[in-house]
Image (spheres, grey):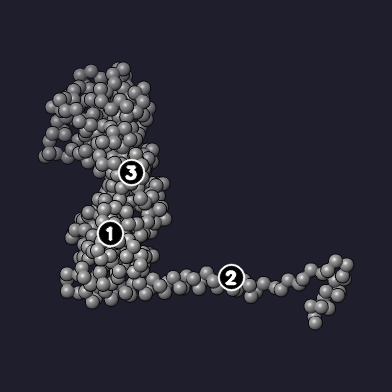
Amino acid sequence: MHRPSDFTAANDPATYGDTEDAVVHMGGSMAKVLRAEDRAQAHQRIAQTFTRADIDQDGQLLQLARLDPSLFIEPEAPRKFDAWKFNRSPSSATWLANAATAYAKDTIGHLFAAGVHPDDEAIFGGKCFLGYSVWMDDPDLLEQALQAGASPDHSSRANPKAIRPEDRIPVRRLASELARQIGIDMGSAGRDQILRMLACAHLLLDHGAAYKDPCPLDGGKLVHQNAISQLTCQWSQKHAPWIRDEIRPLLIKFMQRGADLNDSLGYAPAPPVLRSVWSQSFEAACLLIELGARTEDAFLAESTKWRQPPVTSLVEEARSYTTDGKADLHCARLIEAMMQRQLQVMRNRDCTAAPKADAQASSPAIPPAPAPGASPLASRRRMAV
C-alpha cells in the first residue's frame, strides 16, 4: 500500500492509503474504476481543468468525479500528474483538497455522497473540510457535510499551525466573516450572500456546535472572539434596519448556546453595546439593549476602568462619538431603547408574580388538624366560630 508522505499523523495511517484496486480512507474503501493508462489520462484532465480559468471548472471536475471518485482522494496525485509535484503544501495533497480551495462545490458534494468523510484530514490536506471557506455561504453544501458526519466544532486538529488557533472553531470563523460582510455597503448580491451565511450559522448551531465565552484554546489560553461583539460592532448604516431584522434570531441563538451579551474580555475591553456606540452602529446598540445588554453607569465604568476617565454614561458616550450631526437623534433612540427594556423587565416581573398571587387566592383554606383525642365535630365547631 502506498501512503502519503505528508500528514500521515492526521488520521490513523491504516485508514488511508493507495492499493492496486482501491483507495482506503477514513470513510471506507473506494474502488478504482479507471486503471493504468485510462487512470493516468483522467488525472491529466483534472490537472488541466485546474489550470484553466476560461471553463466551468466545477462542471468539468464533476464529470470526472462521477466517472471515478477515487481519482480525487488518491494520495499525492497533484504532485504526480501536474506542475505541483514540487509543491509540498497541504493544498496539493489530493485533488479533493484542490477542489475545496477552488470552490468546486458540486464536485465536493458528489464526493460526500460517494462516501468521503468531511473530517478526513488526510485527504483534505491536514485539516477538516470545515477548515476551508467554501461552505461558508452555501447552506446546502454545509448540510451535506453535516449529514456526511462533519463535526460542527472542529476544522483542524492535526495541523493546528495551518491557521490561527481561534479559527479552528467553525462557528467563530463564520461569525468573523459575517462581521466583515455586514460592515460594508452591499447590493442585492451581497444581501443574498449574508442571508446564506446566516443560514449556515443557524445550521452549525442547530447541529450542536458548542459556544462559550471566553473561548478556551490549547494551552489554557483565552482569546477574545466574542461573536455578539463581532456581529454588532460595525454595521453598514445604509442597511442597518435590514441587518437588525435578519441578525436578531442568530444573536438570540448564540445567547442560548452560551454567548455572553456583556463580555468584556480582550485588548481594550468593553461590552458589545459600548463597542457598537464607539463604531456609531446605533441600530446595533439598540438591539443589544432590547436583548438585555447592561447599560448601568456603574457597570460601564467597571468595564472600562482601564481608560481614563472610564465611561460613566452610554448616552453621553454616544454623543461624543457621533460624527454625522445627528447626536440628539441617536441619543434619543438609545434612551427610548433603555426605557423600553426597563418596562419589559417590569412586565416580566409582574407576569411572574401574578400566577403566584392567583394561586394563593384560589387555594382553599386548609383547616387545622384536630388535636389528639378531639372529635372532628368539635374541630368544625371551632372553625365556624
Q: Position of residue 206 (x, y in %)?
A: 40, 50
Q: Position of residue 88 (x, y in %)?
A: 19, 27
Residue beneath the point at 36% across and 22% down: 14
Q: Amino acid at mark 2?
A: Lys
Q: Could you tell me how far apart the alpha carbons at marks 3 and 2 are, in whole angstroms?
A: 46 Å
Q: Secondary structure at mark 2?
A: helix
Q: Nearer the viewer, mark 2 or mark 1?
A: 1
Residue beneath the point at 28% across and 33% down: 159
Q: Amino acid at mark 1?
A: Trp
Residue beneath the point at 22% across and 55% down: 181
Quadrant that contains the N terminus: top left
Tag shown at residue 306: 1
Residue 7 or residue 325, whichever sits in front: 325
Would you place residue 43 above or below residue 192 in this image? above
- Say which label, 1 or 3, has the lower sequence index: 3
Other-residue count near label 2 (Cα within 10 Å), few / some / many at <14 / 14–19 / ≥20? few
On screen, residue 227 versus residue 380, left or right, reads left
Q: Residue 277's quadrant in the figure?
A: bottom left
Q: Position of residue 124 (x, y in %)?
A: 28, 33
Q: Which residue is mark 2?
A: 356
Residue 144 or residue 280, whichever sits in front: 280
For residue 241, say whether it is visible: no
Q: Nearer the viewer, mark 1 or mark 3?
A: 1
Q: Which residue is mark 3?
A: 221
Q: Position of residue 26 (x, y in %)?
A: 36, 29
Other-residue count near label 1 (Cα within 10 Å), few / some / many at <14 / 14–19 / ≥20? few
